[in-house]
Image (tube, rainbow, N blue to C red):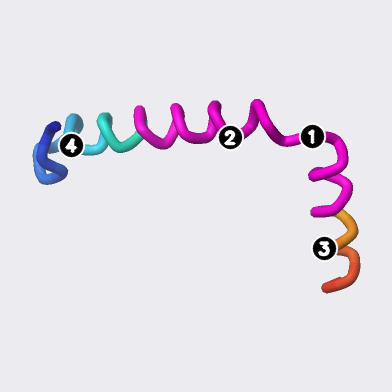
Amino acid sequence: VIPDFVFGLGFTDDIAVLTAAITAVSAHITTAHRQAARDAMADKG
């Protein structure tokens, strides 16, 4: 863990965790999920 105040390096561990989380979640998003999101956004429109 690198402190965030270290310039240039502090946020690299944060980026790595976010990238891993997005990758893990995106593997489980189906076409039905995407369509439900589109429908919800259209209703808000």
Q: Which mark is first along the chain, 3 or 1?
A: 1
Locate the N terminus and report the quarter of the image it occupies.
Answer: top left
Toward the viewer: 12 or 37? 37
Q: Distance between the residues labelled 3 and 2?
A: 20 Å
Find the distance from the CA under tag 4 to the CA under tag 2: 24 Å
- The quarter in which the C terminus is drawn is bottom right
Q: Name the residue under label 2.
A: 25
| Mark 3 Cα-neighbour bin, 10 Å: few <14, some 14–19, many ≥20 | few
Q: Which of marks 1 and 3 is in front?
A: 1
Labels 2 and 1: the sequence-earlier one: 2
N-term-proximal mark, 4 vs 3: 4
**Label 4 Cα crowd, 10 Å radius (few <14 / some 14-19 / many 20+):** some
Badge 2: residue crowd in 10 Å (few <14, some 14–19, many ≥20) = few
Mark 1 near mark 4, Cβ–Cβ under 8 Å?
no
Relative horizontal placement of residue 5, taking residue 36 as reference (left or right): left
Pinpoint residue 14: horizontal percent, then vertical percent.
30, 37
Q: Nearer the viewer, residue 26 or 12?
A: 26
- Of the two numbered discs 1 and 4 on the same chain, state the one appearing first in sequence: 4
In percent of width and height, residue 29 lies at 72, 36
Q: In which quarter of the image is residue 30?
A: top right
**Mark 4 or mark 2: which comes first in sequence?**
4
Q: Which amino acid type is shown beneath numbered disc 3?
A: Met
According to the picture, the residue beneath numbered tag 3 turns out to be 41
Q: Quadrant of residue 8?
A: top left
Tell me, yes or no, whether the two marked residues, 2 and 1, touch with CB atoms within 8 Å. Answer: no
Q: How far apart are marks 1 and 4 (CA)?
A: 34 Å
Mark 4 vs 2: CB contact within 8 A: no
Q: Does the magenta stretch include residue 22?
A: yes
Q: What stretch is highlighted in magenta?
A: 16-37
Do residues under tags 4 and 3 come within 8 Å of each other at their CB atoms?
no
Q: Name the residue under label 4.
A: 10
Q: Residue 30 carries which label?
A: 1
